[in-house]
Amino acid sequence: MKYSCSLPAFMLLCWLQQGVLAQTCYLQEKVITRFEKSDTTYFVYDNKTNLLTENRYKVFDNYYTETYRYYEGTLSSVFDGMFTHSYFTDKKGRAEGVIDADDLGVSNFYQTFTYDTKGRLVKHTYFETPFMEDTLVSSFTVFHYEGDKMVKMEEFADHRESDTQPTSTTLYEYSTLKNPEYNPLYFPAHTEKYVVSKLIYKEADGVQYDDYCYTRECTSNKEGYPLKCTLKYLDGTLKEVEDYTYTCK
């Protein structure tokens, strides 16, 4: 009888422990320090839905704000202080297109997103309508995957859809840490599930551009989110340091 009474208590303890481990952490502040100067991003969320409502940037002594709006829990628009980016979604709630308009409501740009049968983003196309000209493809980006990880990004920086030679290629490797960031204005770079541990950037001629290449090593909290990351160039010299602050619940 004594054993049967203690078993539910043990199970309750395990359930409570699992609940703690399963907490979601919401990024409150990210500080990037390079060359003894820091940039800070503050993240603001809706108290009820936990959806991101603002990104506030402090870059040196300048401040910028991005404001996010939603419709039935799905992102509908972002205002970056100059342009309103209106998002259109498919039946699965995925971003299907974006129209970028200035404060007068004039739009010369829009973007589209294409997914494969597994729901992975495989192409991002940027359209532009120059003054008094027809709309053309300004640039497009193609994404390649291994499972759920985007491992290669190819950018084509001109309007010829038939191009087979990318203007740049970026290769990614990942750690097992959870990525706490979300910013659709830099979609899809900040929508990956995992933290990038290594990035290799190559130009059109295949030459590696070391100023953009880096490795990232991080410490983490018990929930699996990065706390402090050190980025280094491939030669081992320091590139920058990232510090993260969260609220977990």
Image (cartoon, helix red, strand yellow):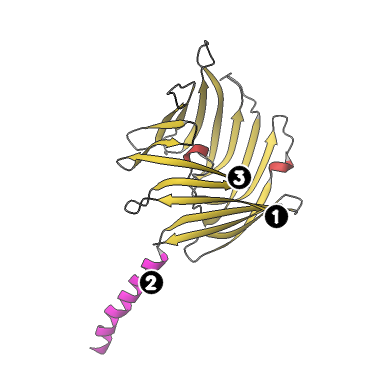
Question: Which is closer to the viewer, label 3 or label 1?
Answer: 1
Q: Residue at x 51, y 27 (%)?
A: 125
Q: Callout 3, which amino acid?
A: Tyr
x and y, in percent, of residue 159 in the image:
58, 19
In the rendered image, the vertical position of residue 39 relative to residue 166, given as above or below: below
Name the residue rendered at 64%, 45% in the picture: 199
Give whichever of 201, 24 is nearer the camera: 24
User: Along the polypeptide, which appears first: circle 2 or circle 3?
Assistant: 2
Q: Which residue is mark 2?
A: 17
Q: Amino acid at mark 1?
A: Glu
**Foreground residue among 160 and 62:** 62
Does 101 sit above or below residue 24? above
- The reply, left or right, for residue 4 in relation to residue 37 is left
Residue drawn at x 55%, y 54% as measured from the top left: 30
The residue labelled by disc 1 is: 36
Nearer the observer, 224 or 81: 81
Q: Which image quarter: residue 84?
A: top left
What is the three-letter code of the residue carrying label 2? Answer: Gln
Residue corresponding to mark 3: 172
Mark 2 → mark 1, Cα distance in angstroms: 40 Å
Task: State the CA–CA distance, disc 3 to disc 1.
Answer: 27 Å
Q: Earlier in the sequence, mark 2 or mark 1?
A: 2
Q: Tell me the crowding category of disc 2: few under 14, some 14 to 19, or many 20 or more residues within 10 angstroms, Cα based.
A: few
Q: Secondary structure at mark 3?
A: strand
| Image: magenta residue range | 1-21
| Total marks placed | 3
